[in-house]
Amino acid sequence: MKKRIAILATNGFEEIELTSPKEALEKEGWQTEIISPESGSIKAWASTDWGRSYPVDKTLEEAIASEYNALVLPGGVINPDRLRTNEKALQFVKHFFEEGKPVAAICHGPQTLINAEVVEGRKMTSYPSIKKDLMNAGADWYDKEVVVDKGLVTSRTPDDLSSFNKKMVEEIKEGKHEHAL
């Protein structure tokens, strides 16, 4: 079945955390779309400096969450910090949890999930510096390369991308999860 996957990002996303999952999803024959508060293009952070610019497929104003089968949240320090204070981004994220659709978040990406108030009672991992934030928001944090909980896939760093991508694809193939929230 042809699936549509939303990748929610803004300026400052960690480049490999968007490009690697996007490639893995497209290898399955699925359509990916970069959704952003910005129109035109967004600029990546590539490890230690600014990376390339990537075209935005739809703005948050244009995107309709119900049209997507799953959501990917790349990390980077700047990206999730900007998204977590954007009410439209938080509403977009919440839709996937309300509908039990798969969500994959890596590195600092789970910061957006904290502000969307969807981490309480969830098993998760993340970049170590946001461990306490997740725990304070009610998540059960594990230091593992990938953690899966009712369609939510989380990983720690770009070093975990191979496992992250594999589990993300697996969860999207499974589809919706009942009572995900």
Image: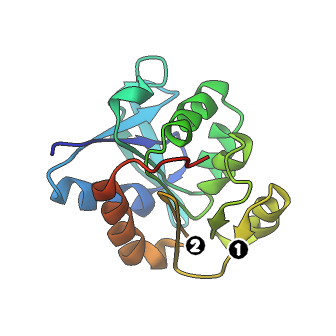
Please name the residue that numbered disc 2 is placed on: 156
> Which residue is outermost to the right?
136
At horizontal 46% and vertical 43% (from top left) the residue drawn is 43
Q: Which percent across, then down, holds residue 163?
A: 39, 77
> Which residue is outermost to the front?
178
Q: Which percent across, then down, holds residue 70?
A: 39, 45
Cβ atoms under marks 2 and 1 closer than 8 Å? yes
Q: Pointer 1: residues within 10 angstroms few (<14), some, or many (20+)?
A: some
Residue 115 picture quarter: top right
In what quadrant of the picture does the N terminus appear? Answer: top left
Judging from the image, what secondary structure is the residue with disc 2 in?
A: loop
Above or below residue 131? Residue 60 is above
At horizontal 40% and vertical 63% (from top left) the residue drawn is 16
- Quick one: 102 or 5, which is closer to the camera? 102
Could you tell me the amino acid type at mark 1? Answer: Pro
Judging from the image, what secondary structure is the residue with disc 1 in?
A: helix
Query: Would you say 140 lies left or right of 13 here?
Result: right
Residue 130 picture quarter: bottom right
Residue 40 appears in the picture as rendered: no
Q: Earlier in the sequence, mark 2 or mark 1?
A: 1
Please name the residue that numbered disc 1 is placed on: 128
Query: Would you say 67 lies left or right of 149 here?
Result: left
At horizontal 63% and vertical 55% (from top left) the residue drawn is 110
Could you tell me the amino acid type at mark 2? Answer: Arg
Q: Which percent across, then down, holds residue 167?
A: 38, 69
Above or below residue 177? Residue 147 is below
- Quick one: 89 or 175, which is closer to the camera? 175
How many numbered circles are shown? 2
